[in-house]
Image (cartoon, coloured by chain):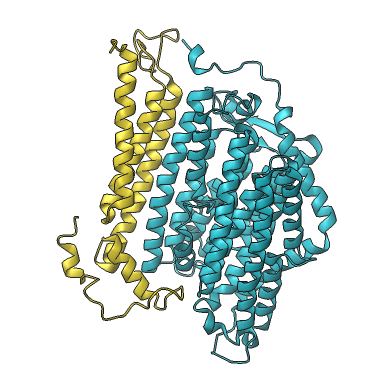
Chain colours: A cyan, B yellow
Amino acid sequence: MTLALPIALPLLSAFMLPLVSRANGTAGRLFGPLMVAANLFVGLALWQKTSELGPRHEALGGFAAPLGIQLYGDQLALLVVVITSLLVLLLWPRGKQDPVREPTLTLMLLAGSCGIALSGDLFNLFVFYELVAVASYGLVASAGTGPAYLASLRFLVLSAAGSAFALLGIGLVYSITGTLNLAYLSGQSSEVLDSPLGLSAFALMLIGFGVKAELFPVNTWVPEVYAAATSRVAGLLSGVVSKLALLILLKLLLGVFDTEAAHRLLLVLGVLTLLSGELAAYRARDLRRVLAYSSIAQLGLVAIAFSVSGAAGVLAGIALALHHYLAKPALFLLAESWGGRLALLAGAARRSPLAAGLFVLTALSLIGVPPLPGFWAKYLLLGALFESGHGAYYLAAALLLVTTVIEAAYLMRIVGHLFEPADTGQKPHARCELMPATLLVSCLAMAAVAAAPLADGLSQVAGQAVAARSQMPALTEQPLAMEERP
Amino acid sequence: MSHLTETELFGLVLYAGSAALIGIGLYLVAVRDHVIRILLGLTLLESGVNLVLVAAGFRADAAAPILIEGITANTAMVDPVPQALILTTIVIGVGVLALALAMALQIHRLYGTLSMRALLQHVAREQGEPAHESLPRPTVGSGDAVPPPAAALEGKLT
């Protein structure tokens, strides 16, 4: 079973879906979810293989590195493939207006996501990132309303400008090192990219990929897009796409830019993101905006976790990311019927008790109340920050605790509104929103119960990701640096 | 000033030119109001970045990396990898631009204007209540700030 299968399967299905839909309407409706389920099984099978045999490289088309594009499948990559397929299946668009457009875009999103997870070449990573970007522009605009089109256009402009900067960074890396293959780049000593030029390349890529990762200062698109898009698309964007962008940054940090300056830069941006997100969420008066800003803050936490060098930081980041993968889409699904001013939520608990209960559970997990998985994730992060031993990280730990208090304040305020004795006539939730939300929250609850084995498994994943540098296959032919070439 | 070699002169012109393109593109994206101007700025930004990549691969006294008559695998060639990269990037840029123009067309059909400021005000009014308690409530009768659709089509090229 080849590593290219999780990428090829959704991509092929995306282009075949309109044809199948033309032939038979029901087949068209079932085709998409069926292919995503198939992708999920392929991901699980590959995960099984990787657990037994270890990470593997695969040369696409038989072209050998360093000029050929390689795929690299370790446990982290396959974890992302599996969980992305799962989320896409749960958040599959209803497609009432158009049964073809949204599912096709979602399948392309899945193909791009698996590509980002598995790619071993820097420019190939960029191309799949652009694929995910275009799919997300289309998905945001598919809500069909005026604000959705405008939000999508503004998102497009910001994201495309960011991508131009990321490409500039990639060009700088190529001109310094002479290669784009991630394995070769990791194999080089870190002094090559420890210069100001290397740091500026990383900064450019941070700005570029930080747009989707919702990092400060390029996350201005987040509130308007999440307010304008449908809740499933918002769940997909905040749940899947943002984590992929952070995964790219992690791959860069672990392999290419393993320098202290690069880690510090990410820490600074992560802290700024966390602070700005939590404070804005506290002031927001609209449920969707609260969730959007809270999403920014949680991603800032993941960025802080990744900026701690060593397996502990990667473990905390993966735990936080997994937790956010499950929690945020659930919240957005619940907010579908509850969108609007917070004051209008009064008494909604009586109309939809299950939804209110799910909201409370997820909110408690976000804040970090034991024994919910959010607590374990934040605890791992605090542990990693204190272990690192540098003053800046202690400051980040203090800020984490302060912002948790702010988070508790605004989330409990919403819960208070929900359980108010007043009644503003909110309609109860539809089943198609409640079911995926219930599934996601029950995954959270299961994670709470199975915390210890889960932590062991994740630390194995993190350890493998970090140790990959020293385990690179013996490179017989180093690419020539710029000066040595004829 | 000592005489610059051909490579250095070439490099200077190319890098300075691409910096200018990136600067102009960034200015248009960040500062201008009309949607088409913003998209034009985006295109210039991408062109500038592509130029930087191509310029990075330049070598003196080398031919283009195309195997035609008289050029064998042993001839000195400029670095072909950046050229392959920007081929892909140009195509991505064209696709994204096409998508953006389609969205701009749809926005114009819905709102009648392509001024970013006016569009944001339209959307803010549509979404009704302010999202933050500290912002003043937009009054419906403030027609001076938002030009009516007919007038928005003329004189909108700022």
Q: Quadrant of the N terminus of chain A?
A: top right
**Picture coordinates of residue A359 (x, y %)?**
66, 74
Q: Quadrant of residue A120?
A: top right
| Closer to us: A371 or A149 | A371
- The residue sitting at 29% across, 35% down in the picture is B20
Q: Nearer the viewer, residue A319 or A385?
A: A385
Place of residue A66 in the rendered image (x, y in percent of width and height, measured from the top left): 58, 23
Residue most toward the bottom?
A: A422
Left/right placement of residue A458 relative to residue B109 reads right
- Counting the numbered discs, the total is 0
Residue at the spot x=37%, y=42% of the render?
B93
Position of residue A118 relative to residue B143, above or below, is above
Q: Is residue A330 left or right of residue A157?
A: right
Q: Quadrant of residue A98?
A: bottom left
List x then y, in percent, for residue A386. Answer: 75, 49
Which of these two is toward me, A284 or A390?
Answer: A390
Q: Residue at x 67, y 31 (%)?
A: A57
Residue B145 appears anywhere in the view: yes
Where residue B68 appears, x then y in whole percent? 35, 14
Residue A155 left/right relative to A9: left
* Residue appearing at x 72%, y 49% in the figure: A385
Question: In this rendering, does residue A4 appear at all?
Answer: no
Check the image and report above or below for A148 versus A264.
below
Q: Residue furthest right?
A: A452
